[in-house]
Image (cartoon, rainbow, N blue to C red):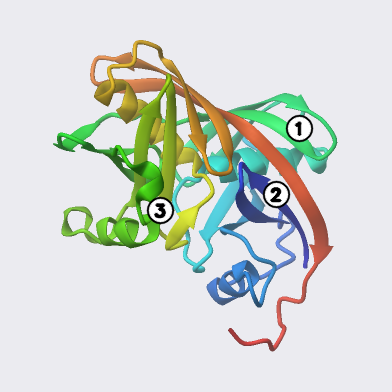
Amino acid sequence: MIFSKFHGAGNDFIMVDNRDSEYFIFSEHVAKLCHRRFGIGADGLIILHKSLIPNVDFKMLYFNSDGNLGSMCGNGGRSFVAFLDTLGLMDKKVTFEAYDGLHDAEILWKGENEWLIELELRDVDNVEVLSPNEFFLDTGSPHLVVFVDNLNEIDITEMGRKLRYDSRFAPNGTNVNFVSHKNGVIFARTYERGVEDETLSCGTGVTASAIAAKEFYDIPDDKIKVKAKGGSFDISFKKEGEIITDIRLKGPVRKVYSGKVDLHTDAQI
């Protein structure tokens, strides 16, 4: 199977063009390919399909590294757009189908194997305040945002896993973001379900963090910079009543390499 590997601010993905249905990829394949010791290594795998929606050419199918079908992935969506560009399938703008519906995206800048891409995410119709420092919202994937003062001292994996499986979010669980604020910049670290660990960044997670941070820190601007371990993002949005609209996630994407892999290797994990 021919594949390419991309990352959006350290959140890395295996990309496969399967518009001709040449490859039969199952959950066990995904888990092996994403394994960082026995496979290529990635936070997830994304398959390019043809969309069946009129006037929409492309469909993004996203799998978490555990092999299960995932919900919307913001960095994956931005990396998907860069992948389309390398295949010569788009100009500056594109609309594609994903788990939660249609998404518009635009290439703002590109160099050699790197891009700056802005992705529009779906509207958020409810931001739930669970406690004085906990917010819950869905930006295409469910996110708990927890505001803390000691971000660099937290064991993200231990605390994230505990909250990810909290009974409040049963049965599917949630992603967990730990967030702080300094000098006008939001800092976020994310525990991702499906990866079951901290990732270097999470697109829908930094978006959820920015939306919640505007409320928690009473930030006057609707354009917010968020820094994650893997890079920086600019998030903009509007609030119309209780609904958050026109949500845009802007950040970097880089192509790492392309290659071929045997889907039917006997290597065991």
Quadrant including the C terminus:
bottom right
In the rendered image, which residue does mark 1 sit on?
A: 90
**Residue found 42% across the figure and 63% down from its top:** 196
Looking at the rendered image, the quarter that the N terminus falls into is bottom right
Query: Can residue 202 be seen in the rendering of this structure?
Result: yes
| Residue lying at 76% horizontally and 51% vertically, measured from the top left | 256
Task: Indicate the amino acid at tag 2.
Answer: Phe
Q: Residue at x 44, y 61 (%)?
A: 197
Quarter of the view holding residue 194: bottom left
Type of amino acid at the residue the image marks with label 1:
Met
Residue 19 in the image: above or below residue 38: above
The numbered dot on residue 254 is none
Q: Which is nearer the eye, 49 or 201?
A: 201
**Crowd around label 2: few <14 · some 14–19 · many ≥20 (10 Å):** many
Of label 2 and label 3, which has the lower sequence position? Answer: 2
| Disc 2 to disc 3: CB gap under 8 Å | no
Residue 162: percent from the left, percent from the top? 26, 61
Residue 17: x %, y % from top left: 73, 54
Q: Residues within 10 Å of mark 3 (few under 14, many from 20)?
A: many
* Residue 254: quarter of image: top right
Q: Measured from the top left, where is residue 80 in percent x and y?
A: 65, 43
Disc 1 to disc 3, C-alpha distance: 33 Å
Instruction: Give residue 61's position: percent from left, percent from top.
Output: 56, 53
Cβ–Cβ below 8 Å for labels 2 and 1? no
Q: Which residue is mark 3?
A: 191
- Nearer the observer, disc 2 or disc 3? 3
Q: Which numbered marker is on residue 6?
A: 2
Of helix, strand and loop, which one carries label 2? Answer: strand
Say left or right for 69 vs 217: right
